[in-house]
């Protein structure tokens, strides 16, 4: 029998003020694998992540976590689903007035009836997993950016989730610290069997951690496949590029970070004059605030 996906998205559409940000995104994520969502700024990565964690609702399509359609769940039922996944935010999102140990202990205290002795043991285990047990008593202001990311990961692991979401885990980190975070993500999948969804535009990190990769562009999936497919594409020689379909040329440019290609050509095609002057505006003489006295 085919395994049941941890995440199953089907034809997901999201619009803001009539503008389509996600246009029919379909994706499955399975236990123990790491899926990297990538694409340029404004392609819909962050919106897709917010839909997956339930902070936004899709305008069309279905998003299932652990078999539950989260777009049509009552809040109390969704709270039970939330306990099964963890989130590492881009900044770490630690509470500055709490020590690292208190940050990690918070979700355990909120969602379990464990004794303080057991909570203390759990906190030490989670901090040890990310190499921060000796820093348990420090405040976030007393540690580096990389340590904050690791502490945020320890908190995301507090309730032993089956699924982890990462929002730009390598952003703002030096290469060595970034590599350490990558190794932690790999360890979570291999040692704990956690499914991981990583939103990033850091290609070194993406190729280090991904089992599968998904390229978004203008809210649609250009390609979803094994890491090897993307690796082979970025290694294509210059003489072979012209024979590739336009979508693959665009993906290759993004993977390599080339200054020239379909992405840069598309930007240069926009009308500078229209962008500079914008649409014509009709000025009305209706006051923005109606007077209360005549």
Image: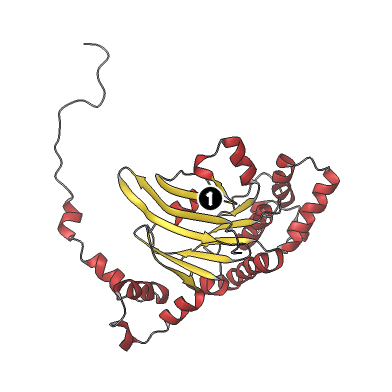
Q: x%, y% of residue 270?
A: 21, 62
Question: Is residue 60 left or right of 164 when viewed as pictured?
Answer: left
Nearest the eye: 168 or 102: 168
Q: Crowding at label 1, few (<14), some or many (≥20) Cα neighbours within 10 Å?
A: some
Q: x%, y% of residue 273?
A: 15, 57
Instruction: Tell me how many marks there are.
Output: 1
Nearest the eye: 189 or 144: 189
Question: Is residue 124 left or right of 22 when viewed as pictured?
Answer: right
- Image point (74%, 57%), residue name: 126
Residue lying at the far right of the rendered structure: 117
List the residue tagged with mark 1. 64
Q: x%, y% of residue 130?
A: 70, 63
- Image point (56%, 69%), residue name: 174
Question: Is residue 119 left or right of 288 when viewed as pictured?
Answer: right
Nearest the eye: 65 or 194: 65
- Image point (67%, 54%), residue name: 161
- Image point (71%, 40%), residue name: 110
Q: Quadrant of residue 177?
A: bottom right
Instruction: State which quarter of the image contains the C terminus.
Output: top left
């Amino acid at each position: 029998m085919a395994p049941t996906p941890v995440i199953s998205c089907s034809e997901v559409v999201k619009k803001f003020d009539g503008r389509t940000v996600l246009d029919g995104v379909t994706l499955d994520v399975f236990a123990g694998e790491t899926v990297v969502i990538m694409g340029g700024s404004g392609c819909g990565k962050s919106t897709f992540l917010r839909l997956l964690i339930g902070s936004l609702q899709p305008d069309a399509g279905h998003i299932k976590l652990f078999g539950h359609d989260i777009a049509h769940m009552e809040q109390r039922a969704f709270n039970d689903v939330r306990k099964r996944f963890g989130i590492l935010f881009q900044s770490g999102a630690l509470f500055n007035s709490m020590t690292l140990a208190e940050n990690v202990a918070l979700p355990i205290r909120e969602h379990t009836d464990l004794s303080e002795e057991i909570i203390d043991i759990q906190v030490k285990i989670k901090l040890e997993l990310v190499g921060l047990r000796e820093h348990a008593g420090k405040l976030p202001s007393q540690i580096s950016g990389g340590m904050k990311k690791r502490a945020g990961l320890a908190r995301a692991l507090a309730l032993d989730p089956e699924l982890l979401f990462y929002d730009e885990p390598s952003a703002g980190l030096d290469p060595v610290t970034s590599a350490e975070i990558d190794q932690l993500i790999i360890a979570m999948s291999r040692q704990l069997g956690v499914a991981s969804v990583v939103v990033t535009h850091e290609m070194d990190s993406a190729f280090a951690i991904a089992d599968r990769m998904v390229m978004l562009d203008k809210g649609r999936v250009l390609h979803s496949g094994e890491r090897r497919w993307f690796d082979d594409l970025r290694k294509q020689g210059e003489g072979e590029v012209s024979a590739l379909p336009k979508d693959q040329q665009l993906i290759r440019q993004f993977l390599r970070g080339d200054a020239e290609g379909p992405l840069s050509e598309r930007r240069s095609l926009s009308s500078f004059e229209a962008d500079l002057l914008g649409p014509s505006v009709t000025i009305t003489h209706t006051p923005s605030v109606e007077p209360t006295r005549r």
